[in-house]
Image (cartoon, rainbow, N blue to C red):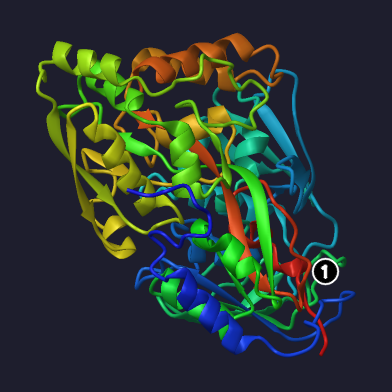
Amino acid sequence: MRTPNRRQALGAGLSVSAIVGLSACGTATGASLDAGKPVKGGTLRAGVTGGNAADTIDAHIPVNSGDIARTVNLYNCLLSRTDDYKIQPELAESFEPNGDATVWTATIREGAKFSDGRDITPDDVVFSFERINDPDDPKAAAASFTMLDKVVATGKRTVEFRLSEPNGLLNDSVSEYTTGIVPSDYDPKNPVCSGPFKLKSHDPGQSTVMERNDYYWRKDGGFLDEAAILNFNDSDALINALLSSQVDAIAQIPLALVEVIGADERMNILNSKTGMWLPFTMRVDRPPFDDVKVRQAFRLVVDRDQMIEQVLSGFGTVGNDMFGPLSENFPDFPQRKQDIPKAKKLLAEAGYPDGLEVELVTAPIQSGVVEAAQVFAQQAAEAGIRVKIRKVDATTFFGDEYLQWDFAQDFWYTRDFLPQCVSCSMDESPFNETHWDDPGFTKIVEKARGISDSADRKNLEHEAQKQLYDDGGYIIWGFANQVDAYQKYVGGLVPNATGRPLSGWRLDRVWIGKV
């Protein structure tokens, strides 16, 4: 279907000649403007796709890329991640466990304030986690805090997280962008913010404008006056907006166009190696995928090297049906490779000697997802698997049927193995898209979560990983680089391993160079 040529704009919606032509029309004569040293002032206009009428500014329920951009910039968590995916202090200057990891104590950073000038207090931290864990309305991070018995203010700047069972990984959960700290009188429609920006305006599916929070605790950034998140319907419109200077930076460019866009003298490419994955999801509780032999066969039809080259234009690394590649205990299982004869044999043993037909639901939810569906269909055909692709728009994909399709796709940013299990591979998981529910697996994960030292829990992690590797419902063929594009006059963007676009959406570090 495709040749492995990075210069071909295959599946990107725009031909190379069209991109080059538009690029040439917009290129100014003379040297391109450089960002130079950091300067204050100006507005950054960042373009994204995938927004819809359900776009949110709520700190605790982000779904799409625009939601996450808003969450990261409007709210701070107690902890966060560095560019190389290490946990670091944020609103908490420390977050430490007791001896058996049943109590964690957070010390709030001295002088930390909300965007209205009020101090961030222990009561606000208590309220934030009670809101996340509300049993009547659990938020996105709630599955990571099932063992959280109580959050208690114990001093002017200290808060205790008291657990019903040991959890040596609570700092990982607290570092997720879905755990932003909000005031105890929080109104998600008119939010007071703890992050580097505060809300100026929000038009769901269209635009969000954020302005600098002058009370923000960090003093080594805060260059921009404003940051605007602008939504576009598709990649064509997004790239056109960049090349015609309607926006200053865009998230997630089609990887087949990286070299072409990078050849424009006005543009820079931001290429970040990440643990982001674009899986195929097989429901293990519905036929034909309730038969493990079918799941194993589907994994064996994939030519992973070809997927990396044709889908990601080489901007990624081969996967082995296991998530969490940056985890300390990532396993070294035998690399799974395409094996058509074995796949056919497994299908025959499962009762499909003549192959079978399946519907694959796909959507442009992340660069490379739709292209992966097309390449997979071609590869699977060799084993007698007839894939009928059903392409929907991003709004439909994340609508009422999300997580219900028998065979579909998704995308995940970088996570370590155990926290990722909590998000997607347990009965309590909010995004259990494969409907994996194995009591033995859950018991292993829960036991491993109680151990703080990574070496001490290594064997348990490998046991859980082997179970998913052999029997699980994911096809994880690779890990995609996060590749964005921006005008050369934009400064402060650096590679970031989280998988989130534009340096993990840390717009507080960005500046607009002076003309």
What residue is at 54 percent from the left and 33 percent from the top? 419
What residue is at 77 percent from the left and 82 percent from the top? 32
Where 3 falls versus 50 (above or below)? above
Question: x, y percentage for residue 387?
Answer: 20, 40
Which amino acid lies under the numbered mark 1 shown in the image of this protein?
Answer: Gly
User: In screen coordinates, is 271 left or right of 253?
Assistant: right
Confirm whether residue 183 shows in the render. Answer: no
Front residue (pair 447, 259): 259
What residue is at 42 percent from the left and 63 percent from the top? 12
Question: x, y percentage for residue 96?
Answer: 77, 33
Front residue (pair 459, 48): 48
Front residue (pair 274, 219): 274
Question: x, y percentage for residue 125?
Answer: 64, 52
User: In screen coordinates, is 85 left or right of 40?
Assistant: left
Question: x, y percentage for residue 60?
Answer: 50, 56
Residue 512, image quadrant:
bottom right
Front residue (pair 134, 66): 66
Label 1 sits on residue = 221
Where 69 falls versus 367 (above or below)? below
What residue is at 49 percent from the left and 80 percent from the top? 240
Confirm whether residue 120 shows in the render. Answer: yes
